[in-house]
Every structure is written in C-alpha cells, then in structure tokens.
Image (tube, rainbow, N blue to C red):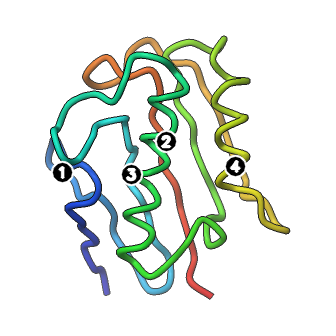
Amino acid sequence: MFKKISTPNAPAAIGPYSQAVQAGNTLYISGQIPLDPATGEMAGSTIEVQAEQVFKNLGAILTEAGMTFENVVKATVLLADIGDFAAVNAIYGKYLCGAVLPARAAFAVKDLPKGALVEIEMIAVAE
C-alpha cells in the first residue's frame, strides 16, 4: 500500500510527483531543492544557505511521516558544482550524524531545477 506524504512546511511539488511516498515502512523522498515553502522562491544564493534550506525541507517531510534524519538509510546529493562538495558535506554532517550513517552518492550535474545549486533525495525506513 502506498501513501502520499505532503506537508505545507516543504515546497509543493513543481511537477507531476509527490513530495514523498511511503510504501510500508519505507519513505521515498523526492529530490528537494532550496525553495522556501512560504514564498516559493529560492532561499539565498550561496551553497551554504541553499543546503540548509534543502535540509529544512527534507526534515519537514520526514516529520510529516513520523520520522527523523536517524531513519534515513540512503541519500543522493546532486550538485551544480562539485567544488561545493565540502561545503554541502559539512552541512550534511550536522543533520546526518547518528551511529549508523546512511549510504550516499554525490554527483555533479549540468543543471538543477530553477537554477538551484543543490538537490537531495532520501530514502528512510521506520523502525
């Protein structure tokens, strides 16, 4: 059984997809870019500000599903510039710092939606 997870505390989907879908005890969170859910505008112009907003958005979706960052088992990080890897990694480490860290992949991509500098998707599992 699939359940759509949606919260006004994260940006609304900008296409034909859900913020997240829960299948059993597994939550699949769509890639989040640094849109401020209150304004629909890009949050800041630096990688640090944008990464923080992405994690706020991810956290809001996890909360809506009754989970936290400790439930995350896999993350995929997409960067407009691989040179931003260290800055994003530092912010990532503030949110994902449990005893068992999630598996992760990070890629540099040509472009991200709306000119974002970073996009992150996650998979989480309820205990």
Foreground disc of the pair 1, 4: 4
Instruction: Indicate the amino acid at tag 2.
Output: Ile
Discs 1, 2 touching: Cβ within 8 Å: no
Residue at the image position 49 percent from the left and 16 percent from the top: 80
Instruction: Indicate the amino acid at tag 4.
Output: Lys
Instruction: Count neighbours of disc 4 (C-alpha within 10 A) and say few if under 14, some if 14 to 19, many if 20 or more.
Output: few
Using the image as rendered, state which of residue 40 and residue 74 is in the foreground: 40
Q: Which residue is tagged 3?
A: 57
Using the image as rendered, state which of residue 2 and residue 71 is in the foreground: 71
Instruction: Please tell me whether mark 4 sits on a helix, a strand or a loop.
Output: helix
Say the numbered circle drawn on residue 94.
4
Discs 1, 3 touching: Cβ within 8 Å: no
Q: Which residue is tagged 2?
A: 120
- How far is disc 1 from disc 3 in space, using C-alphas? 10 Å
Foreground disc of the pair 2, 3: 3
Instruction: Count neighbours of disc 1 (C-alpha within 10 A) and say few if under 14, some if 14 to 19, many if 20 or more.
Output: some
Q: In the shown orientation, is residue 55 left or right of residue 23?
A: right
Q: Which residue is tagged 1?
A: 12
Q: Is residue 102 above or below residue 89?
A: below
- How far is disc 2 from disc 3 in space, using C-alphas? 10 Å
